[in-house]
């Protein structure tokens, strides 16, 4: 729903073809537990699928602070804009039944909207319409605190002048998805919620998934949403008024249900291969640029494998659903705090189920992370094991440079939180990007290693 929901997960440089083995539950649990503690996450539910099988499903923290009720794997969370995948799938189903066409102009269904003859249904699904977004802020404004109907919202926001010429820009707009939801209702003859239940939730046995659930704050095993300002203690978040989330973001679910949904999409259980391709292929702008978004899916095709993702954020909740078709893998994170920093955690978990980059040469000796930790630890002490360095780097890294590096790093503070964020190939070498903290300063290191394990370069800068 909110602006962050449209962001493509920043994974373009993460290396992960199919890993030698899936990560263990213990490994994943260790990663998540560390993040929950360090980031002060109130409640979190995580699911990981690898090669079509759920290999990890665990919950952390509480679903309600006042009662201290724990999150369970069955706890339902608002998933926000991850809902858009379901909305696009509903449209695809009706298109396959010839009840509508993706190239239909909006004017066929809403003739009074701005430039309705020039904007198509697929433009709405790809955020290319130019209709003004009714939910661009990251909090519930005064208007959205009051109940409304999709038609009222559509008539208010899609009769304004366009933000841009259709298809000339990508700009995230929840307004387009309210229109798509109403198109589903007009062409199917059913309410949007009933359509989802009959055509998606029930056939896939998504028993802990619901659209606009009644009284979620009092229903059994449903999370309470929290918010905060200025790093203050969490307080209960006031939800959007009824009608505002709708087909743009009103589904509640669990990680295991969403993993079932992800696999159903990969296996084309509910929609055809052609429809799936439309959802997961980046649309093109009028000048030929890729938008990075299909229909209900952000598309990153610059990584070692195609990564499909969508975030979600409604008042009190954030969500992330990321799918890697090459390994039939997926990662789902749901949290009941709308300030919950799950992005970095999602990136780290996704890196564990990405395919290995066949272009990166094998390197003897320690892993890239272990080698980086060893080098940085030595640099802190001012003594570098020169047997681990290539000849040119050995000469470049004079005693004076080591001393200067030690002095600068020690002046900033202890080196902590060393993490590997990417691996790639250049010049027949493994190139690893390492991020860390020197005191409170964020830093980044670029480490080049040849197959014999020798470090040929390790340069450091502020990040």
Image (cartoon, rainbow, N blue to C red):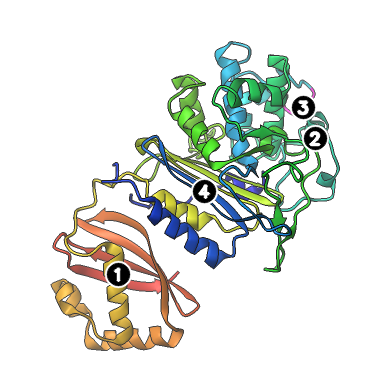
On screen, 456 above or below 8? below
Give the residue displayed 20% in from the left and 53% down from the top.
361
| Dots 3, 2 in contact, CB < 8 A | no
On screen, 251 above or below 36? above
Q: Which mark is residue 113?
A: 3
Where are the magenta residues, as a range?
112-116
Give the residue displayed 26% in from the left and 54% down from the top.
425
Q: Which mark is residue 372?
A: 1
Where residue 295 appears, as percent x and y from the top left, is 55, 31
Count the marks.
4
| Dots 2, 1 in contact, CB < 8 A | no
Q: Closer to the observer: label 4 or label 2?
A: 4
Q: Closer to the observer: label 3 or label 2?
A: 2
Q: Earlier in the sequence, mark 2 or mark 1?
A: 2
Give the residue displayed 49% in from the left and 60% down from the top.
33
**Badge 2 density bin: few <14, some 14–19, many ≥20, Cα 10 Å:** some
- In the image, 172 versus 215, the foreground residue is 215
Cα distance in 3D space between marks 3 and 2: 12 Å
SS for dot 2: helix
Q: Is residue 297 visible?
A: no
Q: Closer to the observer: label 3 or label 4?
A: 4
Residue under pointer 2: 153
SS for dot 1: helix
Where residue 114 appears, as percent x and y from the top left, is 75, 29
């Amino acid at each position: 729903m909110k602006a962050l929901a449209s962001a493509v997960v920043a994974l373009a440089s993460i290396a992960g073809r199919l890993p030698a083995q899936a990560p263990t539950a213990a490994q994943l649990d260790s990663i998540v537990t560390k993040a929950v503690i360090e980031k002060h996450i109130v409640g979190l539910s995580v699911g990981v699928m690898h090669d079509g099988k759920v290999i990890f499903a665990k919950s952390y923290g509480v679903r309600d602070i006042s009662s201290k009720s724990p999150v369970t794997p069955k706890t339902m969370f608002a998933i926000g804009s991850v809902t858009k995948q379901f909305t696009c799938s509903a449209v695809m189903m009706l298109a396959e039944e010839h009840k509508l066409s993706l190239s239909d102009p909006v004017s066929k269904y809403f003739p009074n909207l701005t430039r309705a003859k020039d904007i198509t249904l697929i433009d709405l699904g790809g955020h290319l319409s130019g209709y003004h977004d009714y939910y661009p802020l990251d909090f519930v404004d005064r208007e959205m605190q009051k109940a409304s109907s999709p038609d009222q919202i559509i008539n208010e926001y899609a009769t304004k002048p366009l933000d841009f010429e259709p298809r000339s820009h990508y700009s995230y707009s929840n307004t387009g998805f309210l229109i798509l939801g109403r198109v589903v209702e007009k062409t199917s003859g059913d309410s949007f919620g009933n359509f989802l239940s009959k055509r998606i939730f029930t056939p896939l046995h998504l028993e802990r998934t619901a659209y606009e659930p009644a009284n979620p704050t009092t229903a059994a095993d449903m999370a309470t949403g929290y918010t905060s300002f200025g790093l203050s203690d969490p307080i209960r978040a006031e939800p959007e008024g009824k009608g505002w989330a709708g087909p743009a973001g009103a589904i509640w679910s669990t990680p295991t249900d969403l993993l079932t949904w992800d696999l159903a999409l990969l296996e084309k259980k509910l929609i055809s291969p052609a429809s799936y391709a439309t959802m997961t292929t980046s649309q093109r702008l009028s000048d030929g640029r890729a938008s990075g978004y299909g229909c209900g899916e952000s598309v990153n095709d610059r990584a070692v494998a195609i990564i499909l993702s969508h975030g979600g954020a409604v008042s009190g909740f954030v969500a992330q659903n990321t799918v890697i078709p090459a390994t039939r893998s997926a990662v789902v994170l749901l949290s009941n705090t709308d300030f919950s920093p799950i992005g970095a955690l999602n990136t780290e978990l996704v890196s564990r189920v990405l395919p290995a980059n066949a272009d990166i040469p094998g390197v003897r000796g320690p892993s890239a992370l272990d080698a980086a930790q060893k080098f940085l630890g030595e640099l802190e002490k001012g003594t570098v094991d020169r047997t681990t360095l290539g000849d040119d780097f050995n000469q470049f890294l004079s005693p004076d440079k080591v001393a200067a590096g030690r002095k600068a790093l020690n002046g900033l503070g202890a080196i902590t939180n060393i993490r590997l964020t990417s691996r790639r190939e250049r010049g027949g070498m493994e190139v690893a990007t390492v991020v860390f903290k020197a005191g409170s300063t964020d830093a980044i290191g670029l480490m080049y290693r040849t197959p014999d394990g020798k470090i040929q370069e390790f340069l450091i800068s502020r990040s």
